[in-house]
Image (spheres, helix red, strand yellow):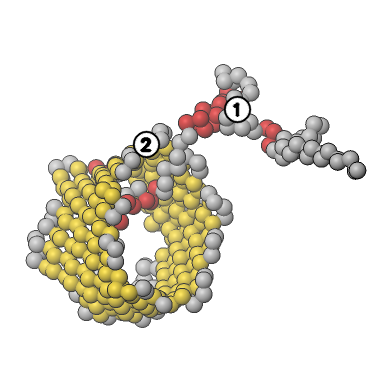
Amino acid sequence: MATPTTPTAAPPPQNLGTPPPGLYSPLGAFSPKDQTPTGSPYNPMHWPRWFSYHKNRLGLPNPGKFERLHGEVKETFVTNFLFDGAQANIIKELSPHFHVQHQFSLGSQVMPPMYNFMSGYMTERTMAQGTMDNDTNLNAVVRHMWSMNSLTKVVAQLTHMPGHSMLQVEHEYNGSDFSINLKAMNPNPMEFTGLYVASYLQSVSPKLALGTEVVLQRPTPDMEETAMSLVGKYSGKDFIATAQFQGLGAIQASYYQRINEKVDFGVEINALVQGQRREAVATVGGKFDFRQATFRGQIDTTGRVSAVLEEKMAPGFSFLISGDLDHMKGQSKFGVGIMLSA
């Protein structure tokens, strides 16, 4: 009878993060975030390590993008969805990465009849989209993610109207607890003219984020104007409160409240306090998601009431109704539209 063999124990798994003795690893210069850094905290040469150590212990979240400070409130408003006259949107998916869209609009009180052709290409890291209207005005956007934290975007607008063409270059970096955004609009490196914007947003607690934005405008080499704003954002369990203090006495504050999964409300106040001038406008909006429809409505202190209803009649087919009534000016606008996706 054969003697059974005892199975040999598998060798313990090798720790790939720790190099074998005698080998140098460049990662060894950086201590893990849960490990107390070496060196005295009273030595200025070791302050960066101690600062990173204490900051990582707080577990601060990413505060989000600076340009999205009031994004949740804007989603409850109808500003980006309002239209008048008749409108039709036909979207065709040509491949998993490429699509085209045809948009027809007519009967508007503020815009002439117009046709827009749009095309878009999208992958996991790159997005390119272009729009051309019947007057051959072109708008293009190209966005590329260099990594999960770094993104570059280029926006171009070419028109026949002098002075209305535009080029914007933007770079964004999102850290674990901060975000940085740099923009340059119509930059001229030779004369250093154009519009330059730099913004920074930092989480200082799990719920509070503070930041600033600096705007430098140089239309000509001998003309320069700067402006600075301070922002604060407080995020609760189901609400977000944001305040932005801009130059020249401009204040913008917003409050977003999530009632449940289908109901959201938002409030925004824009105030201007400059010398003897006192102006303020408050807007209240709500978004309601039903089983086959989405309704948005808003009202402000100027007597303007607006609403947009999107009804999903069938898969890939939606019917839209838009209405806008300004009591103070005695003006009203109404629009109907369809959206077809194939």
Task: Please name whichever residue, 106 or 137, is drawn nearer the observer in this view of the structure.
Answer: 106
Identify the residue at horizontal 70%, vertical 38% (top origin). 17
Q: Nearer the viewer, residue 328 or 25?
A: 25
Residue located 13% across and 65% down the image: 325
Q: Identify the residue at the far front of this view.
A: 1
Question: Which element is circle 1 on?
Answer: loop
Q: Residue furthest right?
A: 1
**How dense is the environment of label 1, judged by Cα within 10 Å: few (below 14), some, or many (20 and up)?**
few
Q: Position of residue 326 (x, y in %)?
A: 12, 63
Q: Earlier in the sequence, mark 1 or mark 2?
A: 1
Name the residue tied to disc 2. Answer: 208
Q: Residues within 10 Å of mark 2 (few under 14, many from 20)?
A: some
- Between the C-alphas of marks 1 and 2, the distance is 26 Å
Q: Nearer the viewer, residue 80 or 293?
A: 293
Q: Is residue 324 left or right of residue 175?
A: left
Residue on which disc 1 sits:
35
Q: Is residue 216 above or below residue 18?
A: below
Q: Is residue 146 left or right of residue 9?
A: left
From this view, report whether residue 208 is shown above or below residue 267.
Answer: above
User: Taking 219 as reference, is 23 left or right?
Assistant: right
